[in-house]
Amino acid sequence: MTLSVRSLTHIYDTGSQQEPALNNVSFELSKRELTAVVGPSGCGKSTLLSLVAGLRPIQSGSVQLNGVELKGCTALQMQRHRQQIGIIFQSHKLMPFLNTAENVLIGAEASTALPVSNRLAKVESLLMSVGMIGHFLKFPRQLSGGQCQRVSVARAIANDPTIIIADEPTASLDFKSTRALVSLLLDIIKFRDIPLLMATHDSRIIEMADRVIQLDDGRVVANETIGKP
């Protein structure tokens, strides 16, 4: 398994009281699979993704990516962990003052082993792979919402991650753009042999997923493999 989560618990301390966000959450992710994390707002989806991504310290439980335990990691180890993850946000979070190619280059620059000329060639290849040929010099304001998310996908995979994490990436997209984006992500994880963990409210995504994990009040209440025709 690429990702293993065991007995993960997280509590927010508001000062006046402690509010549990996750309670004893356990699951595993396999390569080449889209796992959708679903549940009502406030059920712990975003907290779970942030912990797996190394954006919050783990309080209790275990998160292992490729056999490496996150709990107790040093700052340097956590930095290396984050470099293995491609993150796609609900909003594309592209830099408005950078063009398409420059936004993707931000992700490619994490590959410090690559010479600058190779990074530029990689950016071109990535943008072509997500269907953005001809848009290299356009700024985010000149692109549609679906196109901006495609650029964010290219940026997320620029550092050759071993897992992709997406937090409500289709929330602002129409039906056609949603299907196109999820189909693109499915092609990417199968080609790259990596898993995709996606938090979503979108029923259109659930029917395209390989596995659905349902959270309610911070607990896993269902973990089901989806049979596809």
Image (cartoon, rainbow, N blue to C red):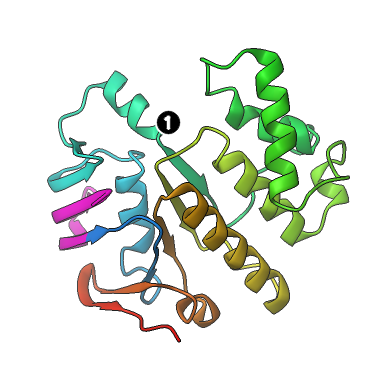
Task: Give the vertical position of 161 relative to 21 (above or below).
Answer: above
The x, y position of residue 185, in whole percent, is 56, 59
Residue of label 1? 83
For the point 61% across and 49% down, the residue is 153
Check disc 1 and give the amino acid type: Gln
Left or right, residue 75 beside residue 35: left
Left or right, residue 116 beside residue 220: right
The answer to whether residue 13 shows anywhere in this view is no
Q: Which residue range is magenta in the image?
A: 1-27
Left or right, residue 65 beside residue 150: left
The quadrant in which residue 44 appears is bottom left
Residue 200 colored in magenta in the image = no
The answer to whether residue 62 shows anywhere in this view is yes
Q: How many marks?
A: 1
For the point 71% across and 69% down, the residue is 177
Left or right, residue 130 beside residue 111: right
The x, y position of residue 210, in whole percent, is 39, 72
The x, y position of residue 161, in whole percent, is 45, 39
Task: Give the vertical position of 161 relative to 223 (above or below).
Answer: above
Q: Secondary structure at mark 1?
A: loop
Residue 9 colored in magenta in the image = yes
